[in-house]
Amino acid sequence: MLAYLLFFINVSLVIINSAVMSLVICVLAIFKLIVPMKTFRHWITYSANRVMWLWATVNGVILRATNDVEWDIKGVQGLSQDAWYLMFSNHRSWTDIVVLCCVFKDRIPMPKFFLKQQLLYVPFIGMACWALDMPFMRRYSREFLLRHPEKRGQDLATTRRSCAKFKRVPTTVVNFVEGTRFTPEKQRNSAKHYQHLLAPKSGGIAYTLAAMGEQFDAIIDVTLAYPANPDSPFKDLLMGRMQRIVVEVSLLPVDEQVRGDYFNDKKFKRQFQLWLANVWQNKDAQLAAVYTSRQPDKALEKELS
């Protein structure tokens, strides 16, 4: 009974927090839209990012108050809020977004997500994301480009222009490489050589690197796991049943392995896919070790409490 009461309380508080913060960001977006001064617009973007930080902080307080969580966090030393990062992670549940925000909100710049152009026109969401300077991109399908070859390369050029504002502002761009949340059914239909992951999709991360590769200082490879709550972590978190959260971080260089013409150089494309597959094999091995271990790691960090 208590678990269901906590579920109702947590859901209500998270919805209220999200609604209030979204409304504040939308108000900031209106001012950003009507005042053309660059300095003022930069201030609006900074303010919107602080509201997003506050949203993540309040969510963390709400959920930590109802969960006795052991945080096992490794590899975050050396991160900076004054750097540019590409972050990718496995995607287990909606809990991932909450965890990533809680763990990294004071360590690196607030995250930016590449969004489809259509989301710009969604009420409130599009305006809020625009105020946060999240880049909107328009990707043309292969079939469309065959019919309109003059459009080839325009989607990438548009994305690069959208990202130009990040040259002076430290930024973190987030990509869930699997493209969808993990489920056993999806895993069975995915590549057979991954036990705890779905097969990675290289196109999205290659697109991000093609648009901003020269700006990134490093790639943050995040491995997330909920070893005591593997089946329904988001529901368990809302019901106060979350026991342990594992966040393992590796910093990868932005070097010749990831910088190249993915869309026109077949040799580089193959090499990039092999690089990502190797990263994913290592991540699968990390998850196997986490899920088979019985005791929490000695290096447990509790600084988030």
Image (tube, rainbow, N blue to C red):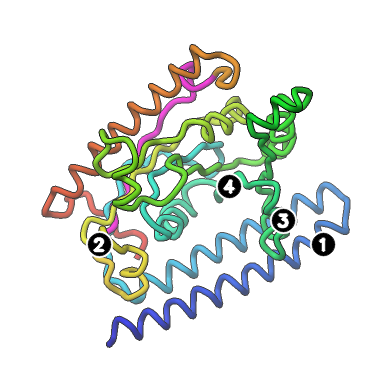
Residue identified by numbered label 1: 31
Q: Residues within 10 Å of mark 3 (few under 14, many from 20)?
A: many
**Where the N terminus falls, by quadrant?**
bottom left
Of labels 1 and 3, earlier in sequence is: 1
> Could you say which quadrant of the image residue 263 lies in?
top right
Residue positioned 38% across, 22% down in the render: 274
N-terminal of the pair, mark 3 or mark 4, is: 4
Q: Amino acid at mark 1?
A: Phe
Which secondary structure, mark 4? strand
Residue 105 lies in magenta, yes or no? no
* Magenta-drawn segment: 244-259
Answer yes or no: do the residues labelled 2 and 4 have beta carbons within 8 Å?
A: no
Q: Nearer the viewer, residue 300 or 112?
A: 112
Residue 90 percent across, percent down from the top left: 38, 45
Q: Is residue 113 left or right of 152 when viewed as pictured?
A: left
User: Would you name the residue on which mark 2 appears?
Assistant: 229
Name the residue that disc number 4 marks: 113
- The amino acid type, in three-letter code, at marker 4 is Phe
Going from N to C along the chain, the mark reached first, 2 or 1, is 1
**Dot 2, how many residues are within 10 Å of its Cα: few (below 14), some (14-19), or many (20+)?**
some
- Residue 87, numbered label: none
Q: Quadrant of the C terminus?
A: bottom left
Location of residue 253 by image quarter: top left
Please indicate whether residue 192 sits to the left or right of residue 16 in the image. left
Label 3 SS: helix
Q: SS for tag 2?
A: loop
Closer to the camera: disc 4 or disc 1?
A: 4
* Label drawn at residue 131: 3
